[in-house]
Amino acid sequence: MDYKKELKNFFGENCLLDESMGSHTTYRTGGPAEAYVYPSSPEEWSFVLKLSETYHIPLHIIGFGSNVLVGSKGLQGIVCSTKRMATISRDGEHIKAQAGAALDKVCEVACRAGLAGMEKLSGIPGSVGGAVYMNAGAFGQETFDTLEYFDVIDRQGRPATLLKEDLKYTYRHVEDIENYIVLSASFKLTPADFPQLMETRNSILHKRIEKQPLDYPSAGSVFKRPANDYASRLIDDTGLRGLSVGGAKVSEKHAGFIINFNHATPEDIRELMRQVRQKVKEKHGVELELEQILWGQFE
Ligand SMILES: Cc1cc2nc3c(=O)[nH]c(=O)nc-3n(C[C@H](O)[C@H](O)[C@H](O)COP(=O)(O)OP(=O)(O)OC[C@H]3O[C@@H](n4cnc5c(N)ncnc54)[C@H](O)[C@@H]3O)c2cc1C
């Protein structure tokens, strides 16, 4: 039987076929995924992993799609969304969240409980799973600062609990994490003054509105911060603010962002990334490294 039929029979309304990835990524553009499913229970994960193994079907895991760009020719295989796994619970100074919970919601829960360590991550528009995968961070705080452990399954469906100290992680990178599907993460925070935490959180949310082009689709900073500098400073200094390809443009508000300002194709965005890298290299000799992740086939 066709694997898509098997998926549809099993997942019912939680399986979408030939689904545009523009609807599931914050760039709001992208080709179709062959199948897009929402597993949540162990049985559902086990089914989809087994199917992928049996038929050799590629598998992608997606949180909120706020760090990926999918080519317009689309994605082969199955995309698994964690959106149906979104519970958050607190036990004293520990907060445990499922992979599909919003990172910002976890930050809010922590601040409201008078717990410090995640307040500066406020406003990052990703899921907990995506934040662990990328070691997302902002304003000098990183996901791994307070992460204690996380529960995973590997691609064969074997469960494990990984402790922070078992992993090698650096700025926006966690070694070998692509072998795992993050199911939940547990954070250990530190008691602190509630009004002060809320003030920090609100001021960071305000700074994001003030400094970032949030009125347009984007996936945040395109490039990682190079050593001792900022990608946005280098891009700005190269005179690239406002540079555009098709419907994609280097934001005039924040040169580190590429925005989809007018029905950009994924290829417009990718070409603009290429031009920015090339021009910054020519002017400053710095090779900008992509923070965003490209999936699927481009024209
Ligand atoms: C306006 C804006 C501002 C942003 N600001 C910041 C910022 O300040 N700091 C920052 O670090 N990032 C920022 N980002 C980028 C992005 O929000 C983060 O990288 C976030 O952590 C990505 O989470 P996600 O759920 O959207 O991941 P996705 O984009 O869905 O996926 C990203 C990667 O994580 C993997 N992944 C996702 N979930 C899982 C899982 N459960 N198990 C295994 N792998 C998984 C995916 O396979 C993919 O490889 C910003 C983005 C936008 C649009």
Image (cartoon, grey):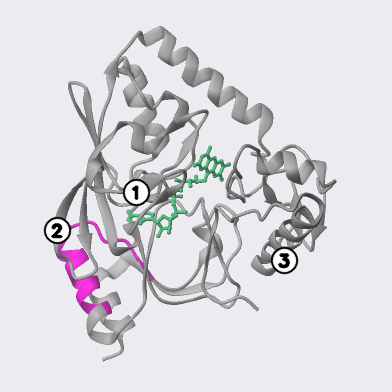
| Left or right: 270 in relation to 122 | right
Based on the picture, tell me whether residue 193 belongs to the magenta stretch.
no
Q: Is residue 252 left or right of residue 84?
A: right
Whether the residue under disc 1 has CB within 8 Å of ligand 1: yes
Q: Residue furthest right?
A: 239
Q: Please provide the residue range marked out in magenta.
A: 36-52
The residue under label 1 is 129
Give the residue pinned by disc 3: 271
Task: Identify residue type, mark 1.
Answer: Gly
In this rendered view, identify the residue nearer to me: 283 or 111: 283
Q: Residues within 10 Å of mark 1 (few under 14, many from 20)?
A: many
Per the image, the residue denoted by label 2 is 159
Q: Is residue 110 above or below residue 127?
A: above
Which SS does the magenta portion mostly show? helix
Q: CA distance from mark 3 to mark 1?
A: 29 Å
What's the residue at 59%, 23% (across, down)? 206
Q: Which corner quadrant of the image does residue 76 belong to?
A: bottom left
